[in-house]
Amino acid sequence: MKHHRHVSMTTLQREIREGIALQGFAIRHVSTSNTEPEFTYTVGLHLPGSSRPELFMSGLSREIRVQWMLHLGFLIQGPPPEKARKQMTNVQGVSAEASAYPEGGRVFQPGVRYLDLTGNGLPTCLGEVDQHYYEDYFGQALVFHSPSAFPVLQIVWPDTRGRFPFEASFERRFLKMQHLLFDPQRYLPLREAELEQ
């Protein structure tokens, strides 16, 4: 029988504050049952009074989810604090000059097909998560932001041919790997992003 370490709410919130201090936002991972895909979300990317969203992503490996969250998070927020950049370059074994971070300030719209946003040659789109999912999926973000409301955008990844789960001919083998927390019908047909990506 496995023993699971109980982590208190105080400890979880401390870890979130440490993540925010390091890179500007924290990343939380949630392991689920065998029937539901694991998922990851940000806490602290949204700032009170701003329209910056938190991000959510399910399916794919944890490593890929983290890469996408960091990349899109920095596109929205801008580079992490200087201390974090130094730590990251030390861990990666590269010079500070070799570590480029985006300027930030990007605003992503739900229902838009962004081409090669994550550098993998495939499109990405986002959907605004319906608030009735918040309690089940974003517990730590709810505690952190309480009592303020905050938007969450779900990062939706395509199949190997660039099709999304709500488009015709999406590869069936990927259907259960990504739980959509929004109604995609409100965004169809997807709009194409402007060339300036």
Image (spheres, helix red, strand yellow):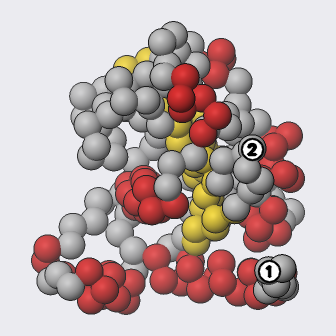
Image quarter of residue 115: top left
Dot 2: what SS? loop
Mark 2 or 1: the one toward you:
1
Relative placement, left or right, of 49 versus 194 is right
* 90 relative to 31 in the view: left or right: left
Q: Secondary structure at mark 1?
A: loop
Disc 2/disc 1 C-alpha distance (Å): 20 Å
Residue 156 appears in the picture as rendered: yes
The residue type indicated by label 1 comes to Lys
* Residue 12 percent coordinates (x, y): 74, 81
Query: Does 81 sit above or below residue 142?
Result: below
Looking at this view, is 70 or 64 the one in front? 64
Q: Which residue corresponds to the image point at 65% horizontal and 54% vertical from the top-left? A: 38
Labels 2 and 1 touching (C-beta < 8 A): no
Q: Which residue, given by chain and number where applicable, does mark 2 sit on?
A: 35
Query: Relative to 13, is 155 above or below?
Result: above
Q: Do we see residue 7 in this rendering?
A: no
Q: Who's the residue at 58% across and 72% down the image?
A: 26
Q: Residue at x 32, y 34 (%)?
A: 122
Residue 88 screen position, x and y as percent: 33, 82
Q: Label 2 crowding class (10 Å Cα cut-off): few <14, some 14-19, many 20+? A: few
- 177 vs 60, left or right, is right
Residue bearing mark 1: 2
